[in-house]
Amino acid sequence: MEIKSCIQKIGFLLLLSSFLSLMVGATNESPVMAFYYGTKMPVKVLRVSIENLSCDDHLGKGILTCYNSFAEMLKANNCTMGPGRDIRCETKSSAEAQKSSEYLPEGTLYTILWEHINYSGDNFACYFDYNDLRTVDFQDITSSVDVFAGTILWEDINYNGSSTYLFADISDLRTRGFNDITSSVERYWAGQ
């Protein structure tokens, strides 16, 4: 993206953010914030403005960084995508642990939640577990999942309600009866 175009987009987003802040302020809700090209913005504003928004929490639990595209997010996280959606990342743990049932510690990419089936729409790359996906503005919208290590999706916050265990990518959560109901997510490993 050209610098001038990027600056114009950020200016527009700041204006939209100010307007929405006034609207949100009237309801006493605190918006979920994310870093976008060095500027802290409400995620809802970014979602309205950017088609297929990609966000992650690689800076720390609940600290979101958002990008214009999935490819941009992969690059920022030292990841590549090979044939057949084979995503590989250089992480704090060994590369061999990727796409296996081995435990990946907190702070290591373990799953990517997607808004729509077939890995499309907005997405959120999880480096940390979340007992309440509202804290990252991704509750009840997950329809497909990239899995790097065992992942448990929960219907309710605080790891309650129905759950489904994932050990491989799933392109359509409707096949598990789990479409658009994920409210918490955590990593799973055999020793748990």
Image (tube, rainbow, N blue to C red):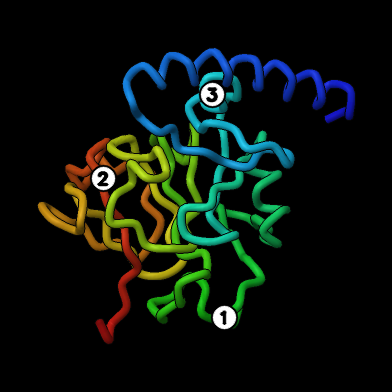
Q: Which residue is mark 1?
A: 93
Residue placed furthest toward the left: 161
Q: Amino acid at mark 3?
A: Val
Location of the N terminus by quadrant is: top right
Quarter of the view holding residue 104: bottom left
Q: Earlier in the sequence, mark 3 or mark 1?
A: 3
The disc placed on residue 45 is 3
Residue at 63% of width from left, 66% of height from top?
89
Residue at 54% of width from left, 48% of height from top?
64
Q: Nearer the viewer, residue 129 or 87?
A: 129
The local crowd at label 1, few if under 14, some if 14 to 19, many if 20 or more residues have their Cα within 10 Å, is some
The disc placed on residue 59 is none
Q: Which residue is mark 2?
A: 182
19 is higher (above) or lower (below) than 151? above
Q: Amino acid at mark 1?
A: Ser
The reply to whether dot 2 and dot 3 touch (C-beta < 8 Å) is: no
Q: Earlier in the sequence, mark 2 or mark 3?
A: 3
Residue at 35% of width from left, 68% of height from top?
187
SS state under label 3: helix
SS state under label 2: loop
